[in-house]
């Protein structure tokens, strides 16, 4: 486990292009049961859509085969994690399956202030913490096609013992009842279709009237019209 000093940000896609600071970035929160495919979908979403930054969480769990520090997670030990809690460095944090997970506050706020949209990939417990602080966030829940399909996926990963898989499946049954707390539901029975649906959600949210950059609107339409009216 990497126990280096903590960092506060991580790049997560080549499509990041700064927007006008007149527009504050949006916060997209995606939750899903383990094994649903949310990580794959999130990575594809960031790769395709510009101005969308994938926040990297901190965790005290050990890396799985193929995972890298600073890419999937920041892997740190528990004393470092507890120190970050004491310094109020997390937007949310929770203990899941015996390990701690937390979303760094500063990196998220910096990106949003720059006008860049932020994508959080967190569990239900963390999402409910975030919702208390960011009611204007966009909350998306991804469901597997069925419990049986999810069981097969978890068994196929071969990374968890049978008792761990049983525990995860039981937690899924508890988590799905929170679906009413989310604004969108995506059923991931086809990866390509699910990605298109997620893209549609992001694009639609960016185009909502309440997201309109009023400074741009006034400069382009209201003030421009007034200057013509005042001209001799």
Image: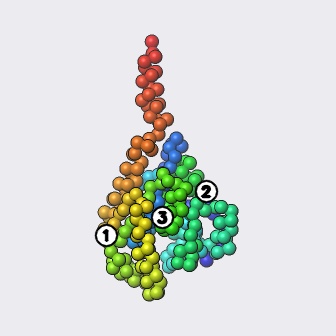
- Where disc 3 sits, the SS reads strand
Quadrant of res 173? bottom left
Image location of residue 167, percent across then percent down: 46, 82
Q: Secondary structure at mark 2?
A: helix
Q: How is the image coloured?
A: rainbow
- For the point 33% across and 59% down, the residue is 196
For disc 2, the neighbor class at 10 Å (few under 14, some 14 to 19, many from 20) is few
Left or right position of 61 against 217: right
Q: Quadrant of residue 80?
A: bottom right
Tell me if 132 is positioned left or right of 81 in this view: left
Residue beneath disc 1: 189
The local crowd at label 3, few if under 14, some if 14 to 19, many if 20 or more residues have their Cα within 10 Å, is: many
Q: Work out which quarter of the rendered image holds the N terminus and state it.
A: bottom right
- Cα separation between marks 1 and 2: 35 Å
Q: Is residue 159 above or below residue 192?
A: below
Residue on which disc 2 sits: 106
Question: With 4 as the anchor, is 187 left or right in this view?
Answer: left
Q: Residue sitting at 54 percent across and 72 percent down?
A: 68
**Which residue position holds label 3?**
121
Tell me whether circle 3 and circle 1 mark residues in contact (CB < 8 Å): no
The image shows residue 226, relative to residue 51, as above or below, that is above
The total number of labels drawn is 3
Q: Tag 1, which secondary structure?
A: loop
The earlier-in-sequence mark between 3 and 1 is 3
Are the residues tagged 1 and 2 within 8 Å (C-beta)? no
The answer to whether any part of residue 187 appears in the image is yes
Q: Position of residue 149 (x, y in %)?
A: 33, 77
Q: Is residue 48 left or right of residue 97?
A: left
């Amino acid at each position: 486990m990497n126990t280096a000093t903590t960092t506060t940000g991580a790049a997560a896609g080549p499509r990041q292009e700064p927007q006008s600071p007149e527009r504050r970035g949006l916060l997209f929160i995606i939750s899903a049961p383990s094994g649903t495919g949310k990580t794959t979908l999130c990575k594809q979403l960031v790769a395709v859509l510009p101005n969308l930054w994938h926040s990297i969480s901190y965790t005290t769990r050990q890396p799985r085969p193929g995972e890298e520090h600073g890419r999937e997670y920041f892997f740190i030990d528990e004393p470092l994690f507890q120190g970050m809690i004491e310094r109020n460095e997390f937007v949310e944090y929770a203990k899941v399956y015996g390990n701690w997970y937390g979303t760094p506050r500063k990196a998220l706020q910096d990106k949003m202030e720059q006008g860049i949209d932020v994508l959080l990939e967190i569990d239900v417990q963390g999402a409910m913490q975030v919702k208390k602080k960011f009611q204007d966030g966009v909350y998306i829940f991804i469901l597997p096609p069925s419990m049986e399909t999810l069981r097969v996926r978890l068994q196929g990963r071969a990374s968890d013992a049978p008792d761990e898989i049983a525990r995860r499946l039981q937690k899924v049954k508890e988590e799905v009842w929170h679906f009413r707390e989310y604004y969108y539901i995506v059923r991931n029975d086809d990866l390509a279709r699910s990605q298109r649906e997620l893209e549609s959600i992001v694009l639609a949210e960016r185009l909502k009237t309440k997201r309109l950059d009023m400074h741009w609107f006034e400069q382009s339409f209201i003030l421009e019209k007034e200057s013509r009216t005042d001209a001799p």
